[in-house]
Image: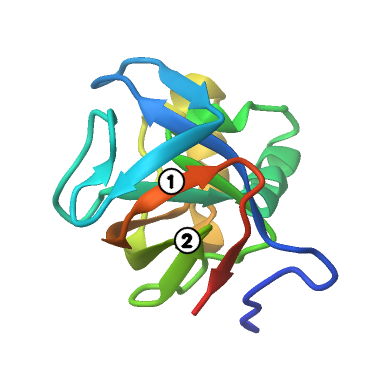
Amino acid sequence: MERRDVTPGLEPRIESIWIKTGRRGPMLRVPEARLVEDVGIEGNADRGGARQVTIVDADAWERATSELGTPVDPSARRANVLLRGIDLAGSADRVLRLGSCRIRIRGETRPCGRMDEAADGLREKLEPEWRGGAYGVVLEGGSITVGDPAGWE
């Protein structure tokens, strides 16, 4: 597979931010969030460890739901950040910049059975090419806002 880092002709950016309120709890859409170095997103239920921040690519999400034939709100993915114009496939150990923050991608966020609760067959459609997203650790914290630029270092 040919690797592409960003979508040509598109300024990569943060499209949405969510805070996970608790295990199986609702995802709260917010206009901004604070990332804390080596901890994760302030107020998020999952913090620490290697999965401090979870990220999904809007283009990959849309390809999956298009193949499914059913529109599904990306909040169903239960990721913290939705990016537009950044390909996450194969990005383990790369550093992603979100606004002034830096995140080291640690791996692929594999889709779980909860995806089929959102829409039957969604899990299968998220399997290829890291469509389920990526997770990482916060190297440099700060605030992120919807619309902030994103990019690889």
Q: Residue furthest bottom?
A: 2
| Residue type, label 1 | Ser
**Which is nearer the eye, 110 or 5?**
5
Residue 79 visible in the shown view: no
Element assignment for label 2: loop
Q: Which residue is mark 1?
A: 143
- How many discs mark residues in the rendered view? 2
Question: Mark 1 packing: few (<14 Cα in 10 Å), some, or many (20+)?
Answer: some
Quarter of the image with the N terminus is bottom right
**Which is nearer the eye, 127 or 135?**
135
Q: Residue at x 47, y 61 (%)?
A: 100
Q: Is 86 displayed left or right of 92 in the figure? A: right
Q: Contact (CB < 8 A) between labels 1 and 2? A: yes
**Which is nearer the eye, 67 or 99?**
99
Element assignment for label 1: strand
| Residue type, label 2 | Ser
Locate residue 20, reporting x and y percent. 35, 27
Q: Residue furthest top?
A: 25
Locate residue 34, reporting x and y percent. 37, 41
Locate residue 127, reporting x and y percent. 49, 53
Residue 100 is tagged as: 2
Gap in angstroms between the C-alphas marked 1 and 2: 8 Å
Q: Residue at x 53, y 57 (%)?
A: 99
Q: Is 39 displayed left or right of 54 in the figure? A: left
Locate residue 107, reporting x and y percent. 33, 64
- For residue 112, which quarter of the picture? top left
Residue 152 is tagged as: none
Answer with mark 1 or mark 2, whichever residue precedes in sequence.
Answer: 2
Question: Mark 2 packing: few (<14 Cα in 10 Å), some, or many (20+)?
Answer: few
| Residue 41 versus residue 71 in the image, above or below | below
| Residue 53 versus residue 119 in the image, above or below | below
